[in-house]
Image (cartoon, grey):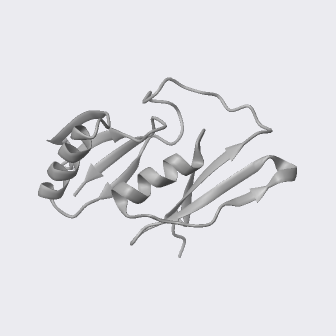
Amino acid sequence: MPRIDHIAIWAKDVDALAAFYQRIFGAEVGPRYINASKGFSSRFLSFPQGPRMEIMTTTTQTLIETPFGSQRMGLAHVAFSLGSEREVDELTQGLREKGVPVLDGPRRTGDGYYESVVLDPEGNRIELTV
């Protein structure tokens, strides 16, 4: 049966983004992989449950930048299930107090989710949900 193994995110600063996910979500940060001939490097992040995340950078490809936090075609967000509405409330408030942009919530959505939406240091949208 297929399952999602990992998602991959291009980043300007692999180490800073990895540190954010480690600090906020308890990710275990793997060793840096470097392929000098392709101008590529990355780190895999493992979480207590679910798929891994690969954070990548390149010096040989021109990546299209979008405004910080903008919606774009393709991958829209990554959602982290925290287990309870209280945990969503507490983490959202804690991130807000640390200056992390909170775009929405916490709130109950029309489809029944309880969530908030925050941005990581590179402007990727993260849903915090039950």
Q: Judge left or right: residue 109 versus residue 103.
A: left
Query: Furthest-left residue in view?
Result: 86
Q: Position of residue 65 (x, y in %)?
A: 60, 27
Q: Nearer the viewer, residue 105 or 23?
A: 23
Query: Furthest-right residue in view?
Result: 37
Residue found at x 50% / y 54%: 18
Task: Examine the rendering and report whether any part of residue 9 can be seen.
Answer: no
Q: Position of residue 118 (x, y in %)?
A: 32, 40
Image quadrant where residue 26 sits: bottom left
From what the image shows, is residue 24 above or below residue 26?
Answer: above
Image quadrant where residue 84 sits: bottom left
Query: Furthest-top residue in view?
Result: 67
Residue found at x 64% / y 49%: 56
Residue found at x 22% / y 58%: 130
How many labels sit on residues? 0
Q: Position of residue 96 (x, y in %)?
A: 23, 38
Q: Judge left or right: residue 122 versus residue 108.
A: right
From what the image shows, is residue 43 above or below residue 59?
Answer: below
Q: Nearer the viewer, residue 61 or 31?
A: 31
Task: Examine the rendering and report whether any part of residue 68 can be seen.
Answer: yes
Residue found at x 61% / y 59%: 43
Q: Position of residue 59 (x, y in %)?
A: 76, 39
